[in-house]
């Protein structure tokens, strides 16, 4: 077990989903004016993705990097005949061994980072997300289920003007604990009625 509630296999399976969501995020939410991008050549735009994950040991890191390389290879293949040339460049950070508040501030302030994927844990995200909110840095939350965190960083028109989000930056990929509980209860009721 890498972090409470998540095995390395579960995290690896989410990596492909996360990177797919990142593609969508890049194409829908970022204009050239929104982020400073590098030009690999005159036709290619490089998007750096900071990945903050519970890497743990070297074997887990290798498997996660291999999954990311697989996704990026498929992404490159899908765009090979397109006039828009995008190169995704991941940067890895270990969620388990980082000062997450400081790392959040550093990554959110970097103009060359297009988006941040992770951290994976609810407690880690609670420490990390405020800096991304302040800088409007796109933040993909792969495994966050905390209703409190989702509500705090969701787009809203109600509440305090200084703390209310009016622009998207937070992209959770999982349902909240409440929604997951409702789904499990509905499934249980259906199973009980069929017996």
Image: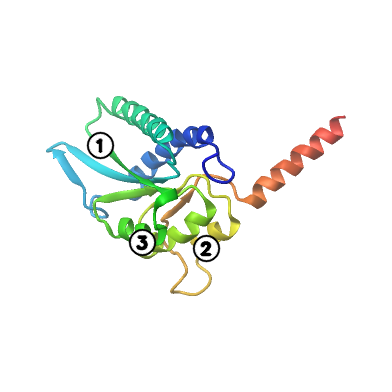
- Neighbour tally class for label 3: few under 14, some 14-19, many 20 plus, Cα within 10 Å: few
Residue highlighted by disc 3: 102
Name the one closer to the observer, 11 or 170.
11
Residue sticking out furthest to the left: 42
Q: What residue did someone put label 1 on?
A: 86
**Closer-to-camera residue (136/5):** 5
Where residue 26 appears, as percent x and y from the top left, is 34, 44
Q: Quadrant of residue 149?
A: bottom right
| C-alpha separation, residue under disc 1 versus residue under disc 2 | 32 Å
Label count reads 3
Residue 53, image x and y in percent?
A: 43, 44
Which quarter shows the N terminus? Answer: top right
Instruction: Single out the mark in the foreground, 1 or 2.
Output: 2
Q: Is residue 29 visible?
A: yes
Q: Which residue is at 39% across, 54% downward?
A: 98
Q: Secondary structure at mark 3?
A: helix
Reading the image, the residue beneath label 2 is: 152
Q: Residues within 10 Å of mark 2 (few under 14, many from 20)?
A: some
């Amino acid at each position: 077990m890498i972090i409470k509630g998540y095995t390395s296999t579960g995290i690896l399976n989410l990596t492909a989903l996360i990177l797919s969501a990142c593609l969508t995020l890049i194409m829908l939410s970022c204009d050239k004016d929104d982020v400073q991008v590098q030009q690999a050549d005159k036709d290619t735009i490089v998007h750096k993705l900071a990945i903050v994950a519970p890497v743990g040991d070297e074997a887990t890191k290798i498997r996660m990097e291999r999954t990311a390389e697989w996704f990026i290879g498929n992404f490159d293949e899908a765009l090979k005949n397109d006039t828009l040339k995008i190169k995704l460049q991941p940067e890895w950070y270990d969620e388990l061994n980082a000062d997450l508040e400081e790392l959040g501030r550093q990554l959110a302030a970097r103009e060359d980072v297009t988006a941040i994927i992770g951290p994976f844990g609810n407690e880690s995200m609670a420490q990390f997300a405020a800096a991304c909110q302040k800088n409007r840095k796109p933040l993909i939350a792969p495994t966050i289920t905390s209703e409190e965190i989702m509500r705090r960083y969701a787009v809203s028109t109600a509440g305090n003007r200084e703390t209310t989000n009016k622009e998207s930056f937070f992209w959770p990929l999982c349902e909240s604990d409440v929604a997951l509980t409702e789904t499990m209860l509905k499934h249980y009721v259906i199973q009980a009625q069929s017996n």
